[in-house]
Image (spheres, helix red, strand yellow):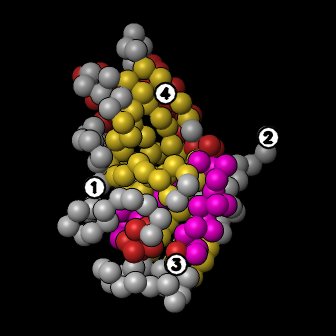
Amino acid sequence: MSEAQSALNGAAFEGYVTVTEAGLRGMVTLRADLSDARVKAAVKKLAGVELPGVRKIALKGGKGAGWMSPDELMILVPYAEAGATVAALTKALAGVHHLAADVSDARAAFRVEGKAAREVLAKLSPTDLAPDRFGEGELRRTRLAQVSGAFWIEDGGFTVVCFRSVAGYVFELLKLSATPGGEVGLWA
């Protein structure tokens, strides 16, 4: 069996912020009625957090859950635990209409860190990233130029997630947006 590889093998760029590929991360899509008590209990047990509200993410100890749509969560776990998380969800939600799928290898994750990280993402997304409008615990599923993505604040920087098939494009967008000389200085 081959060893899992991240999309861009740890690519990094140092501009007026730092952009790095975050490496392998376990990501499980859960589609279900998010108001169901069994769904809430299963998420809490497996992700270690309460079900997040609309456009929110809850993180704790390398695990978490992010709201993606009215009937969809992204559950974050260590990469090696994604398959077991799907199996545990399937068992816990037996008899409950749901879909749990390991999408870890279909996604890529990046870190954008530095004083002007908000500005770099604001150049690529229609999201209002003003500090009083987007803070810790917020998640946005949005566009990054011409492709779908999502991002949130984590450990003092932004985590950006996209489809693996467009990881090279998103990395180049982030690099271009972070190239020295392009600073606007909006929130820095």
In the foreground, 188 or 136:
188
Tell me if residue 59 can be seen.
no
Q: Residue at 53% x, 30% y: name it.
A: 101
Mark toward the start of the polypeptide (3 vs 4): 4
Mark toward the start of the polypeptide (1 vs 2): 2
The Cα atoms of the two marked residues, 4 and 2, are separated by 24 Å
Instruction: Report the side of 92 relative to 133 (left or right).
Output: right
The Cα atoms of the two marked residues, 1 and 2, are separated by 37 Å
Check disc 2 and report its element: helix, strand or loop. loop
Q: Position of residue 111 (x, y in %)?
A: 49, 66
Mark toward the start of the polypeptide (3 vs 1): 1
Q: Amino acid at mark 3?
A: Ala
Residue under pointer 4 = 100
Q: Residues within 10 Å of mark 3 (few under 14, many from 20)?
A: many
Q: Amino acid at mark 2?
A: Met
Which residue in the rendered view is the most extreme toward the bottom? 181
Q: Amino acid at mark 1?
A: Gly
Q: Position of residue 116 (x, y in %)?
A: 39, 79
Mark toward the start of the polypeptide (4 vs 1): 4
Single out the mark in the foreground, 4 or 2: 4
The Cα atoms of the two marked residues, 3 and 1, are separated by 24 Å
Q: Is residue 4 found inside the magenta-colored segment of the image?
A: no
Q: Which residues are magenta?
A: 153-176
Q: Position of residue 74 (x, y in %)?
A: 43, 40
Residue under pointer 1 = 137
Single out the mark in the foreground, 1 or 2: 1
- Dot label at residue 178: 3
Which residue in the rendered view is the most extreme toward the right? 1
Check disc 4 and report its element: helix, strand or loop. strand
Single out the mark in the foreground, 3 or 1: 3
Q: Residue at 47% x, 65% y: name it.
A: 124
